[in-house]
Amino acid sequence: MPSQLQEALSASAPVQSDRRIVRVAIAGNPNSGKTTLLNQLVGSRFAVGNWPGVTVERKEGVVDFQGWRIEIVDLPGIYTLEPIAEDEQIAADCLTRERPDVILNVIETPRLERALTLTVELAERGIPMVVALNMSDEAQRAGLAVDCEAFHALTGIRALPTNGRTGQGVRELLPAILEAHRQQQRPALRIARDMLSEVEPQSLADERLGIAEGLYRAVIRRREPQGRALTAAVDKVLLHPVGGLIAYLAVMYLFFKISFDFSAPFMDWTDGFISGYLGRLATHLLGLVGAPELVVGFVSEAVIGGVGFVVTFVPLIATMFFLLTLLGMSGYLARLPFLLDRFMNWLGLNGKAVIPLLLGLGCNVPAVMATRTMESRRDKLVLVMMIPFMSCPARLVVFSFFALLFFAQHAALVIFAMYALGVLVAVATSLLLKGTLFKRSVAPMIIELPPYRLPRLRTVGTIVWSHVREFLYRAGTLIFAVSVIVWALVHLPPGAKPQDSVVAQIGRAVVPVFQPLGLEDWRVTSSLIPAFLAREVALGFMGTIFAVEEGSNTETVETFDLVAETREQVVGFGEAALDGVRAVFSLGIQTFATEDDETTRALREAVRDSFTPGSALAFMILLLLYNSCLGVYGVMEKEVGRRYALGFLGWSFLVGWVVAFVVYQSWRLISGGA
């Protein structure tokens, strides 16, 4: 689809009516409801990706209408077509060089006067245009109405009132788009192109502003407001220097509690369904056809296990994006940068960096993806370099295991120290970059404070699904490929025992690198390889190497009862749903509770002999600080490029090694060599 749309938008020749394709670009200010309107127009045929060659988010969709194929792309939200930021450059290039057939100009009607300045710039392109006067219901409550007939007479542009949240007026947009395309209804309101070279930029900007103000006065109709909106009253609390911070902490606590506690039972069920049910089913079926043992192991462990690892995180990703979309569409998320801007300036960033950093505590992958909201590439790069140091739940699994094993009396303090250390290293990285590679001043923050709105669940669900689908495609393919490679290394050469495998040889080869950290056992150093796939995989890998899980996956063909196992999975899913709801309404964050099953008890006994308390701390610090996982590296490469992603791998490993070395050697001095 992206290549088709790119090819379609590249046509600048006169339109041929027999092509029956209309290429539409949605343009408008940020928070004008463009994405919601796109969702109403195309429904489930709505996709999220990146613009070719850049990292700004691209939304697009297709709708068939009256025998026409209407291909729609949502341009980044902008205030002007004079490029400053990356998103503005993309919008300007699309409209100037690629020239869509029709521009759908989405205007936030309550802020019509400001939006008309962009409308004047768009009209200068000479492309047929339709205006969607979005959020018309809010304008009506504020006592504002637009004379659409007068607007059409003065500009040559059809203007239609719409409500993207409810879908009101959206159906009328498609006939208007087709009419504008077929009749080639170019705007009559534009500055003559022969004037552009004769007018100073500031004079041109003043002229555009004057036209916009004159048009606003000509078409606006004021009425008695139907009632005062709650926005101003609520903002007195949520933007208060003290009350706002208290409210923010409460909202963030609920955000993470719901994200962790609601998704955790589903993650556990998904893990059991993939690795337990599907893995054993595959073993059962392959056993029936007499497949070789190596093939059975590859399918159940590498193929199903690799896919299952990715799918396991989908409940968390979906829950976080659901809550994030709710907060964004409600209008609250836009206020956090304003509230915390002063603190973020000290780190060399503006207030918009708050959201991705907070997301990093839940999962680094969506946190890196959320950096697309930053106006400047400089700010985005700094933020991307900070996020992987924010500790995620995958690391918590490892921290809990080692803290309870070696520091049982102070386990909570050790775990908290790991989280605090990650934050401190992230801050230090930001300050270092601010003083070296990125010395430029912080980009000014331009944010919109929209009114509070009640999001529609259908729209939220569509947006969440688009992000989940992108996560599966980007992170899933990469993780799956590497899981197959890791499995192969464990089983090579064919028939070799773990201590004679390629992994063992690699583990022994890297022992000198980690020996100064107290990690001298090849079985420990080799676990760092799959730990790059995911932190918690290190425990399962060590369990295999230490042979404490031997025989745990030796199910035979006769032991698998398809009906009983399927019934158990259905019941388990229902129990997961109930557990998720109960956990949400419980006190505290239940996900932080640690469990102790037979497998972990056996693993603890085996690991205890290969670590000291000092080397255990070093191991935890290394897993905390060197790049969080392969999925994060994958999205980092997509967002900022391979050069910066590889550079961060080197930096994070260096920082992790140095800090782990200092802690381990200090522990030895204090404890007398233990």
Image: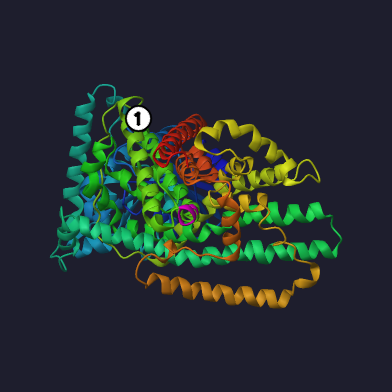
Residue at 36 percent of width and 53 percent of height: 413
Direction front: furthest residue: 672
Residue at the image position 41 percent from the left and 36 percent from the top: 669
Image-based side of 663 in relation to 337, left or right: right
The one nearer the camera, 603 or 268, is 603
- Judged from this view, the residue extending furthest toward the left is 224
Is 265 above or below relative to 503?
below
Looking at the image, the residue that sits furthest to the right is 290
Whether residue 405 is in magenta: the answer is yes
Residue assigned mark 1: 433
- Percent position (x, y) of residue 422? 38, 43
Left or right placement of residue 534 versus residue 214 in this view: right
- Number of labels in the image equals 1
Q: Is residue 183 visible?
A: no
Q: Amino acid at mark 1?
A: Leu
Secondary structure of residue under mark 1: helix
Apparent side of residue 291 relative to residue 563 in the rendered image (left or right): right
Is 253 magenta? The answer is: no
Colour setting: rainbow
Where 4 sits versus 461, above or below?
A: above
Quarter location, residue 161: bottom left
Please state which of residues 538 and 137 is positioned toward the viewer in this rendering: 538
- Residue at 26%, 29% (x, y): give it: 441
Which of the 4 quarters of the picture holds residue 488?
Answer: top right
What segment carries the magenta color?
402-406
Residue 449 visible to an observer of this rendering: yes
Residue 109: x and y in percent read: 25, 55
